Image: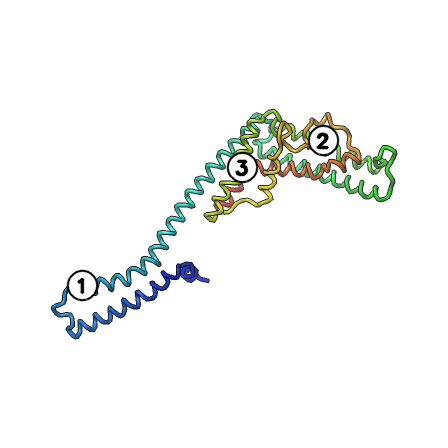
Amino acid sequence: MSKATEAWRDTPPITQRLSIWMPLLGLLILTLGLVGDMRGWWEGMSFLTNLLSSLTGLLFGVPFALLVLSRLTSAQADIAEQRGVRRLVERSLREFDAAVHAVFEGSDHCGYANLEEAVHAWRQTAQRAAERLMAAEELIRVKMSEQALDSTGDLPVDNELRAALDTADAAMRAARVYFYSAPPRTDMLEEIRELRARWEVLDQETRVRAAEVGLSWVSHGVRASITKGCSGSGPNVWPAIFATPSNEQRPLTPSTLQAHKYSTRVLGTAEFLWNLLTVSRRIREVIEA
């Protein structure tokens, strides 16, 4: 469907009828006027000829104004509105970025140039930890289908299972150690509350305004990751897997690994932090694309 056809279908029925009949009537009066000029009908009737000439121009001009000029005015208004929304988006992104940097201010970047590079490296560490954890979880499921639980209600740990648990434990401890050098302290409650508030404005208000004027946005998965990560309350505002330092964590056992679903939580934490630090850049990229 062409743009002209689509624009015509969007035109109100009364405007469509006027745009058809007024030019036809104008053609009729124009033809009558030309014939009258050739036959001398209008001699001595200057007022009538001026009146018919004005009416003819009106019959052609009104449909043009209704169909063309109104579209141009509407397009200019849409462009102006989109520019205003772009300024709103940029202002919301700057406020959100400021809140993110306030939360992470003073954190150790572990030798990396900036916080984004540091969290990218930690994300890779967390993904490796999750792979080790999922391997141990799968081994536990297999062995539980083959063996009975011991007197403590846990799965007996043989050499194979112990090796898998130790590997997963070491990988998760490495992820925790890095995590504690990058993310914020849990005593920064005011800064974290401000971060949540800025994210709510960006996700629930600015995003809706952007959608109204046809601007693209980041995916639902990215938004859901940040919303979930910012949804904690009290001092435990970040995912619970990192609620205590690594040296206070007890060695992994089959029951704790199953109960806490560490692989899911460590991946969720990694994606949350990465999305938190990169969402503004990605929003700018999709809007400008």
Q: Mark 2 and mark 3: span between their CA atoms? A: 33 Å
The reply to whether dot 2 and dot 3 touch (C-beta < 8 Å) is no
Q: Earlier in the sequence, mark 1 or mark 2?
A: 1
Residue at 53%, 42% (x, y): give it. 282
Per the rendering, the mark at residue 276 is none
Observer-side mark, 2 or 3, equals 3
Q: Position of residue 17 (x, y in %)?
A: 36, 64
Residue sitting nearer the eye, 152 or 83: 152
Q: Say which amino acid is labelled 2.
A: Arg
Say what amino acid the circle numbered 1 marks.
Asn
Q: Position of residue 96 (x, y in %)?
A: 51, 34
Mark 2 nearby-residue class (10 Å; few <14, some 14–19, many ≥20): many
Q: Is residue 181 left or right of residue 98?
A: right
Give residue 234's position: percent from left, percent from top: 62, 28
- Extreme left residue here? 44
Mark identifier at residue 200: 3
At a point 21% along the width and 65% down the height, the residue shown is 52
Q: Which residue is mark 2?
A: 173
Q: Is residue 223 above or below residue 240?
A: below
What residue would you read off at disc 1? 50
Q: CA distance from mark 3 to mark 1?
A: 64 Å
Q: Secondary structure at mark 2?
A: helix
Q: Nearer the viewer, mark 1 or mark 2?
A: 1
For disc 3, the neighbor class at 10 Å (few under 14, some 14 to 19, many from 20) is some
User: Of callouts 3 and 1, which one flags the residue occurring earlier in the amino acid sequence?
Assistant: 1
Q: Position of residue 157 (x, y in %)?
A: 84, 35
Please tell me which residue is depicted at 73% across the width and 25% down the height of the picture: 248
